[in-house]
Image (cartoon, rainbow, N blue to C red):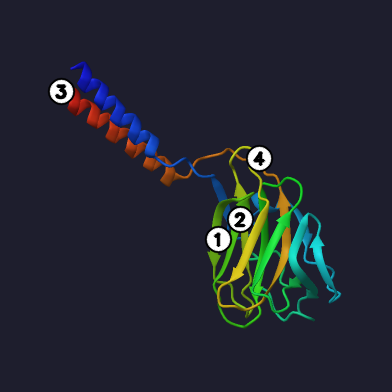
Amino acid sequence: MNMKKLLVLSSAFALLGSLPALADSFVTYSTPVSAYTSGTTNYGGGDGSEGDITSLGVFSFSNSLEEDSVPSSWDTWNSPPAVESSTPNVLWTQGNSTLTLTLSGSANTVGFELEPDTESAENVTASFYDGGSLIDTLSLDPNGAAGALLFALTDTTPGADITSIVIDDTTGDDFAIAQLRAGDLSTSPTPEPSSLALLGTGLLGACGMLRRRLHV
């Protein structure tokens, strides 16, 4: 009986050890709600002068961006409540379909609005990183005909920071971004439900195995 108990316990610990570690917990925002805007600094989208810049506030860009404005040098955007303003200053990627935003300082919340250049809906992904670790990838379909959308995320994992975001228009089109925001929001970290469910399933399975084995 003691040998059986030892074998069952060993199997249970092996099962628990095989479960993946809980991923970073996070919250995303589909519109610029007050919980997002009140805890972040808005660095805007340049000055509308049509000059080129490679950084703005805490953000550095992987390639130079042109400072435009809606509706003079960039035709359309979107309207509240989907975005903060229908006539923002924007930063155009000038032919590039990908862009990496790198942040200095500490921020667990980062967001921006984005509209593609072509007047149609296009799939755009934004991958948020904490160092070399992927937090999450947002995949949205903004429309170049007045259909800008918000890409924003808070990493609620204690001590976590968002250090970079890789943006990719998967159709190969260029795009403009606006309302660049970053800040630290006080949040109560909650692991993702899928991770908790997986952990709970593993624990229940291990306990069930132990009960069955001990009553052999």
Question: Residue 45 falls in which quadrant of the image?
Answer: bottom right
Depth check, mark 4 against mark 1: the one in front is 1
Left or right: 72 in relation to 29: right
Q: Is disc 3 in contact with disc 4, using a CB cutoff of under 8 Å?
A: no
Q: Can you give x and y, in whole percent of width and height, for residue 208 in the image?
A: 24, 31
Which residue is tagged 3?
215
C-beta proximity under 8 Å, tags 2 and 4: no
Front residue of 203 and 132: 132
Total marks drawn?
A: 4
Classify 86 as above or below 127.
below
Q: Amino acid at mark 3?
A: His
Circle 4 is placed at which residue position? 186
Q: Kindly identify which residue carries mark 2.
A: 128
The earlier-in-sequence mark between 3 and 2 is 2
Q: Which mark is residue 138?
A: 1
Left or right, residue 206 beside residue 178: left
Q: Earlier in the sequence, mark 3 or mark 4?
A: 4
Cα–Cα span, label 1 and label 2: 8 Å
How busy is the neighbourhood of tag 4: few (under 14 within 10 Å), some, or many (20 plus)?
A: few
Q: Are marks 4 and 1 in contact (CB under 8 Å)?
A: no
Amino acid type for the residue under numbered disc 1? Leu
How far apart, in angstroms, are the residues tagged by discs 3 and 2?
Answer: 49 Å
Determine which quarter of the picture holds residue 55.
bottom right
Query: Taking 31 as reference, is 115 above or below it?
Result: below
Quarter of the image for the N terminus: give it. top left
Sequence-earlier tag: 1 or 2:
2
| Residue type at tag 2 | Phe
Q: Earlier in the sequence, mark 4 or mark 1?
A: 1
Q: Estimate the x, y position of residue 114 in percent, counting from the top left.
A: 66, 69
Q: Residues within 10 Å of mark 3 (few under 14, many from 20)?
A: few
